[in-house]
Amino acid sequence: MSEKKSTAGLASIIGASSVGTLIEWYDFYIFGSLATIISTQFFPKDNPTAAFLSTLATFAAGFVVRPFGALFFGRLGDLIGRKYTFMVTLVLMGGATFAIGCVPGYETIGFFAPLLVLVLRLLQGLALGGEYGGAATYVAEHAPANEKGFWTSWIQITATAGLFISLAVILITQSSLGKEKFEDWGWRVPFWVSIIMVYVSVLIRKNMHESPLFAKAKAEGKTSANPLKESFGNKYNFKYVLLALFGATMGQGVIWYTGQFYAQTFLLKICNIDFQQANTLLIIALMMGTPFFVFFGWLSDKIGRKGIMLTGMLLGVLCYRPIYEKIYQTANIKNKEEITAKTTEEVKRALVEGTSDSLITTTVTKEYTDGTKYKEVKKVTVLADASKEAPKPDVVKTVKLNEGDKWTMIWMVFVQLLFVTMAYGPIAAFLVEMFPVKIRYTSMSLPYHIGNGVFGGLMPAIATYLVSKAKDANEAAEKAGQAVVNAQPYLEGLKYPMLIAGICFVIGLLYIKEKKGGVE
């Protein structure tokens, strides 16, 4: 077979593998991308912070069960084959995603709304747990031994591409329907669109052939009769499972979710950046950063995978605080000069439907000399019965940045994406090369999904909780007439990824041995 024909064949294999994986990531990330809106749909509205944290916890639940999906579907993949297993995961993921878009809101069915969403998120997590290992293994087993990093890095792009497409679909839907309709019911459209993409992907994957290495092992009777026992019951192999987790995927997971998901949460919830503007600048940064997945995958074939991945983790540990401090201060309106003549305030008073209570809505808009715009909408409920405790005021702040500050944000996210591509680009080839063919799907899937699903997936929820806790401590201190406990509460969430990535860097540096270009 000529090199040209071989390359074309590999490109076709990657395309078929990637389209399904991309759609699964799209399905998985819609929920996270819409967390702010979903929190108002499936949870009680009387405590927005608790509702948002509950939404992030539900989002994280899908990550927590990923290792179980890795075990279940990894075992199937090592028993019956790679192709049929990730066909099943694709259908399961697509069905669960479509169903989330159909679940009635909390006001309609009460507690059953978050319960149903949680169950569907768990199904999504199980499906994704089986998808990635199958796709990465399938591509790696078709690729030449000295080019595994380059070819598998195209699978790595699918995670970021899935996030990119989810953001794009959300923005297009919101622009088409308008903000009010989108927040009312339009947010369901991106979930519904998924089913069309899944159908197309299933048609493509039906024509794929089984991995040649697995087919050969099966024909020779060398497949594993008990992949779970051989993967985790064998001390030698289990040692490599633990090394893969604590010396590679754990740190890679927190770097990945900090650079993409927490960056989004930080912009929206902590910096109060306008929803469309925040997602637009994220899309631009993702477009700029995505090619580096392939670059670092290719580079790992030349100089080894370990050094590149650990460098990405170390850079995250060293640079996160200054990067996020820059992001926060760029959006901080206290650093800007207000044009007082353009400040407006509008107060509206209306009766709460079905009660004698009043709702006072105060809208304040401000403009600044650098072109930044600020809007604050404060809703206060005044109870007719003064003896009852009124709910907390609902305050929504929105900052719309000027063009220069927008590009500052883009570059700050882009730099984080470079860390992501260094840690993530080579890791599929790195994991595939650690384990033998007959138990590869099972062995590599578990550490990958614990590292990404548990350590990485919990990152946004843990970080948001740490920031909220630090702010509460400051407020309590101020009420008591004491000095604030933490001068930079907005940076508290970074302690988690910095700690995990730091531990992983040390373990990987000391205990993982690798030959130049990886080992087969």
Image: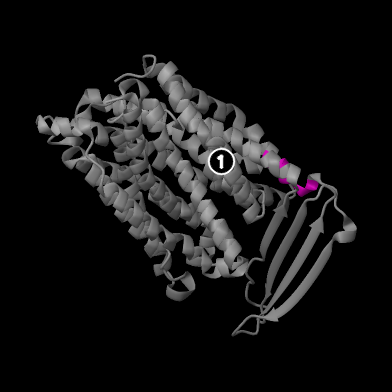
Task: Classify residue 363 by image quadrant.
Answer: bottom right
Is residue 416 shown above or below 236?
below
Determine the residue positioned at 69% across, 37% down. Answer: 326
Locate the C terminus and report the quarter of the image it occupies: top left
Q: Looking at the image, which residue is at 56% across and 29% down?
A: 317
Q: Secondary structure at mark 1?
A: helix
Q: Provide the residue designation for mark 1.
A: 287
Task: Please identify the residue farthest to the top as the structure is shown.
Answer: 515
Question: Any magenta on residue 347?
Answer: no
Give x and y (percent) for residue 407.
69, 41
Which residue is at a point 51% across and 47% down the rendered structure image? 164
Left or right of 13 on screen, residue 437: left
- Residue at the left extreme of this rendering: 221
Compared to residue 305, the image places residue 161 above or below, namely below
Residue 117: % across, % down: 40, 61
The percent position of residue 126, horizontal first and vertical second, equals 32, 49
Chain part drawn in magenta: 327-334
For label 1, the crowd category at 10 Å Cα-Cα, with few meaning under 14, some 14 to 19 and many 20 or more, is some
Q: For this rendering, which residue is in front, 506 or 429?
A: 429
Residue type (three-letter) at the residue carrying disc 1: Met
